[in-house]
Structures are given as structure tokens and as C-alpha cells.
Image (cartoon, rainbow, N blue to C red):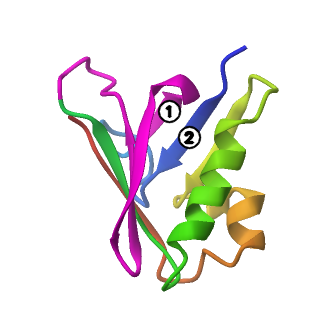
């Protein structure tokens, strides 16, 4: 069974572009943008050539830990929805919290290719 990852901005998740669910199999990469921002990329849900990106603002210097938490979520073999980062409801994966990646300044921004 496929695992799906859920991401939501702090916008209510009630309009296009405010949240997204990606199959784990569409993950294309993760890159540090700065000491406090990591880009997580998936194949575009709309089927366009450009990837969909999630910009995740996090605790300073936690890119490696974000990678670890994402690898854990992507390898979940239960075939369920994994809430990785839901800014609307302040729900983050347990691994993100355990590794100290989240604080009051943490944000999610989704961009669709």
C-alpha cells in the first residue's frame, strides 16, 4: 500500500494551494535553502514539468533532522496518511518534534508546479 504525506499552511486548508497530499513515491528531493528553511519536492500533482515544493521554515540548523524525519515518514509501511506538517492544527510528525525541528516560528508554504 502507498503511504501519503500531508502538508498544510496556516490558511485554513479550505482553498486550492493551502494544503497538499503527496504519495511517497512522488518524492523527488530535499534541499537546504538557508539555515532555517528546507525545500521538500514532489512530482507535480497537476502533471506539469516543474515539481511541487514545500518550503518548511524550522529551527536553525535542523536541515539534517528534517531529512531524518522525512525519511522516517516516507518509509512508513502502513499505507496510511502521514501528517508530516499541519500548520493549521499545530500537528507535526512525532519525529519532527522529537528531533527539535519545530518552534513557534515554524511555517509551511506549498507551491505547485
Quadrant in which the N terminus is drawn? top right
Query: Is residue 38 depicted above or below 24 in this figure?
Result: below
Residue occupying the point 67% across, 65% down: 96
Picture quadrant of residue 67 = bottom right
Q: Earlier in the sequence, mark 1 or mark 2?
A: 2
CB of mark 1 within 8 Å of CB of mark 2? yes
Picture quadrant of residue 73 = top right
The answer for how far apart the CA atoms under marks 1 and 2 are is 4 Å
Residue occupying the point 66% across, 18% down: 2
The total number of labels drawn is: 2
State the SS at label 1: strand
- Camera-side residue of 46 and 90: 46
Residue 66 included in the magenta stretch of the image: no
Along the horizontal axis of the image, is 20 left or right of 45? Answer: right
Query: Magenta segment range?
Result: 20-49
Q: Is residue 17 visible?
A: no
Residue occupying the point 64% across, 47% down: 71
Q: Which residue is mark 2?
A: 6
Amino acid at each position: 500500500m502507498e503511504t501519503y504525506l500531508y502538508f498544510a499552511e496556516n490558511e485554513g486548508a479550505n482553498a486550492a494551494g493551502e494544503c497538499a497530499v503527496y504519495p511517497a513515491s512522488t518524492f523527488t528531493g530535499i534541499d537546504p535553502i538557508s539555515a532555517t528553511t528546507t525545500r521538500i519536492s514532489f512530482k507535480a500533482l497537476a502533471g506539469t514539468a516543474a515539481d511541487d515544493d514545500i518550503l518548511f521554515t524550522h529551527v536553525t540548523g535542523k536541515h539534517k533532522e528534517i531529512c531524518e524525519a522525512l525519511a522516517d515518514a516516507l518509509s512508513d509501511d502502513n499505507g496510511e496518511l502521514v501528517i508530516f506538517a499541519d500548520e493549521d492544527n499545530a500537528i507535526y510528525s512525532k519525529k519532527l518534534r522529537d528531533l527539535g525541528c519545530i518552534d513557534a516560528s515554524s511555517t509551511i508554504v506549498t507551491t505547485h508546479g
